[in-house]
Amino acid sequence: MQNAFSAISRVKDGNVAKTGATILGKIENLISRLKNNENSDTHNIPKLRGAITEDGAFLMEWATEKFRAGISIEPDERDSGWYLVTTRDLGDLNSSGSFTQKNEDEIINKLLSYVIQNT
């Protein structure tokens, strides 16, 4: 998570930075709660990486050899989205969609659940 928090601190667009920091905080809280649950194995979660794209968007991504799962926060929030792409070993999935305030908690939960179950 440190990489992602470091990257968000360099985002120039205030709305992107605020939204990205909020999302990172939600992910960090979820992982922290899961670590306190004896039934959850969070030890192998890949690092959540953050990057700033050429157009000023903030990308946060979990990546392994078998999948990539991420969220892109765009300067025009209507363009923000999520994605999940996997290799054939994990079903050759290619899913994506819009990421809005309305669905952000659902998407965060689904992506994090997938990451935990497949690492």
Image (cartoon, helix red, strand yellow):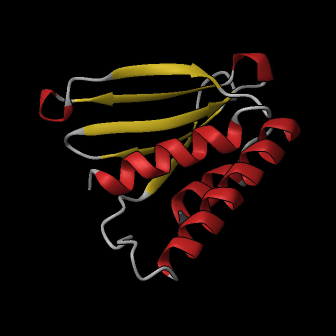
| Residue 75 appears left or right of 91 | right
- Quarter assignment of residue 103: top right
Q: Nearer the viewer, residue 1 or 88?
A: 88
| Residue 85 appears left or right of 96 | left
63 is higher (above) or lower (below) than 83: below
Image quarter in which the C terminus is found: bottom left
Percent x, y of residue 59: 57, 37
Name the residue furthest left. 89
| Residue 50 appears left or right of 66 | right
Instruction: State the residue at coordinates (21%, 23%).
Output: 92
Q: Nearer the viewer, residue 60 or 12?
A: 60
- Quarter assignment of residue 95: top left
Name the residue furthest front. 39
| Residue 59 appears left or right of 78 | left
Percent x, y of residue 83: 47, 27
94 is higher (above) or lower (below) than 15: above
Percent x, y of residue 38: 42, 83
Percent x, y of residue 25: 70, 61
22 is higher (above) or lower (below) than 83: below
Q: Nearer the viewer, residue 3 or 43?
A: 43
Instruction: State the residue at coordinates (61%, 58%).
Output: 27
